[in-house]
Amino acid sequence: MPGLEDLYKEIIMDHYRSPRNQGELASPPAHHALGINPSCGDEITVYVSVDDDDIITDVAIDGRGCSISQSAASMMSEAIKGKTTAEAAELSDAYKGMLAITDSGDKPDLSMGDLVALRGVSKFPARIKCATLGFNTLLQALENSGSTTSTE
């Protein structure tokens, strides 16, 4: 559907030009990680604050790279706020599952918000690492409290 594809491209470019939650958190985050895609040089740093109930209360991203990696990280940062860390991990799994499916004909899962705009990346296997860098880095951050790591 050409009209829908144009809308998805517009959403991706909007997040690339005006990334949400960009920068660092004002107070030291409980979790952070640096993710690097060595095949293309994309970089994402994810900062996450989690409260005592395991709810993500704040998130910030910083990085550089292609429109796919940067817009995907922006979309992810909006989608995980207010979720528990377990819900964020489930969203990561669902998102990665969406990207693994090609020409399935399934209706997109609109509960993913803007992330559904990246569904077409599944047609370009080399770009899937770009599209998943934000979530991979988020998961590393949540596993490694207060550390900086690299992920592919």
Image (cartoon, rainbow, N blue to C red):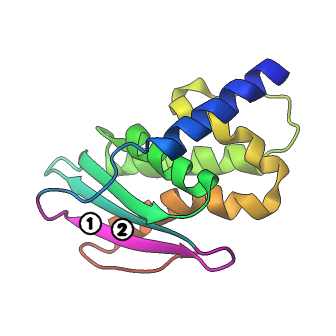
The CA span between labels 1 and 2 is: 5 Å
What residue span does the magenta drawing correspond to? 27-41
Front residue of 73 and 65: 65
| Residue that mark 2 sits on | 141
- Please tell me in which quadrant of the rendered image residue 45 appears: bottom left
Left or right: where 150 falls relative to 130: left
Q: Residue pushed farthest front?
A: 17
- In x, y percent, where is residue 111? 53, 27
- In x, y percent, where is residue 71? 54, 47
**Dots 1, 2 in contact, CB < 8 A:** yes
Left or right: where 91 falls relative to 77: right
Residue 1 can be seen in this image: no
Q: Residues within 10 Å of mark 2 (few under 14, many from 20)?
A: many
Left or right: where 18 falls relative to 3: left
In the displayed structure, 7 sits above or below 95; it is above
| Residue that mark 1 sits on | 31
Q: Residue at x 84, y 48 (%)?
A: 123
Q: Residue pushed farthest right?
A: 103
Looking at the rendered structure, the kind of residue marked 1 is His
Q: Which image quarter holds the C terminus?
A: bottom right
Q: Secondary structure at mark 2?
A: helix
Q: Secondary structure at mark 1?
A: strand
In the displayed structure, 133 sits above or below 118; it is below
Looking at the rendered structure, the kind of residue marked 2 is Ala
Front residue of 27 and 107: 27
- In x, y percent, where is residue 128? 71, 58
Asked whether residue 67 is drawn in magenta, I would say: no
Q: Which image quarter holds the N terminus?
A: top right
In the displayed structure, 10 sits above or below 54; it is above
